[in-house]
Amino acid sequence: MDLGIKGRTALVTGGSRGIGRAISLELAAAGCRVAVVARGVPAIESTVAEVRAVGADAVGISADCTTPDGVRDAVAQTRETLGDPSIVVFNVASGPPGSYGEINDDDLLVGFRNNVLALKWLVDETVPFMRGDGWGRFLSVSTMALRMPHRALARMVADTTRLGTAGLSKNLANTLGPDGITLNILGTGSIETEAFHDTFGKKAAQLGITYEQMVEQKVADIPAGRLGQPEDMAAAAAFLCSARAGFITGQVLLVDGGRVESVL
């Protein structure tokens, strides 16, 4: 399927590992030039090499996109090397883990900065030339906890402040829709990344079971009968960033294998 985005420039934050890496590669396969933005240089270089191996132009940028300076630097370097980004994937750390009584006000403020302000900063830096082109895509990588907050994991900061991402995206979708710019969110289910393995490996050890037994418990609650893979997220991401998805905006799409039981 031709997604209609060949030759466009995509900026992918958190683009060097896990879901972000898979999205970088999927957009490259669709013909995009890709700026792989993250903090760890070795992982950035590895992913850039993979992107170039599929025949796409790529640049690696080491920047912290939870800060205004990091966002400005990432956008400036992308524009200088690949051109104005018309596709922006927002994929950053959601904030410190912990439940009520374990986190403090400063932790919640970090979550608000990472999940709300950082997205606004990216919009501020990229919307002017998207408007000039009459076309743009913003996609945030979030969580199924937007519909069903975590019980198995202590993620109060993420579960609370990522709702702010959804509220901001919906407001901006209303404002920027007439300019041909969409804003959508992907909610992750149980996606088998290194981070997933680390998190649930530790939880399995706490429960006195193996990681494999932990996975069996997770899969039992997933109608699709398996864990998701980063490529499942990437396929959905590429579509929502495509020309074909121009009438989809302000939405949350869960990629969870049917795990969340709500109808809406």
Image (cartoon, rainbow, N blue to C red):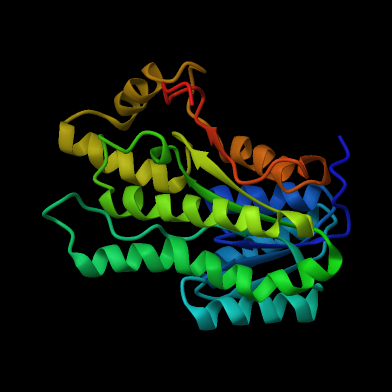
Q: Does residue 212 sit above or below 22 in this rendering? A: above
Q: Which residue lies most toward the left here?
A: 101
Residue 18, how many percent across, how many down? 53, 49
Task: Give the quadrant of residue 33.
Answer: bottom right
**176 or 89, which lies in front?**
176
Q: Residue at x 85, y 56 (%)?
A: 55
Q: Is residue 181 visible?
A: no
Residue 23, how many percent across, how many down? 65, 49
Task: Give the quadrant of residue 34.
Answer: bottom right
The number of callouts visible is 0
Q: Is residue 152 visible?
A: yes
Q: Does residue 59 sit above or below 191 in this rendering? A: below
Q: Residue at x 31, y 32 (%)?
A: 211
Q: Is residue 95 left or right of residue 127?
A: left
Q: Is residue 159 left or right of residue 165?
A: left
Q: Is residue 36 left or right of residue 208?
A: right
Q: Residue at x 44, y 60 (%)?
A: 115
Q: Is residue 45 left or right of residue 219?
A: right
Q: Does residue 237 sit above or below 167 in this rendering? A: above
Residue 158, how many percent across, how many down? 35, 52
Q: Does residue 220 sit above or below 250 in this rendering? A: above
**192 or 210, which lies in front?**
192
**48 or 5, which lies in front?**
5
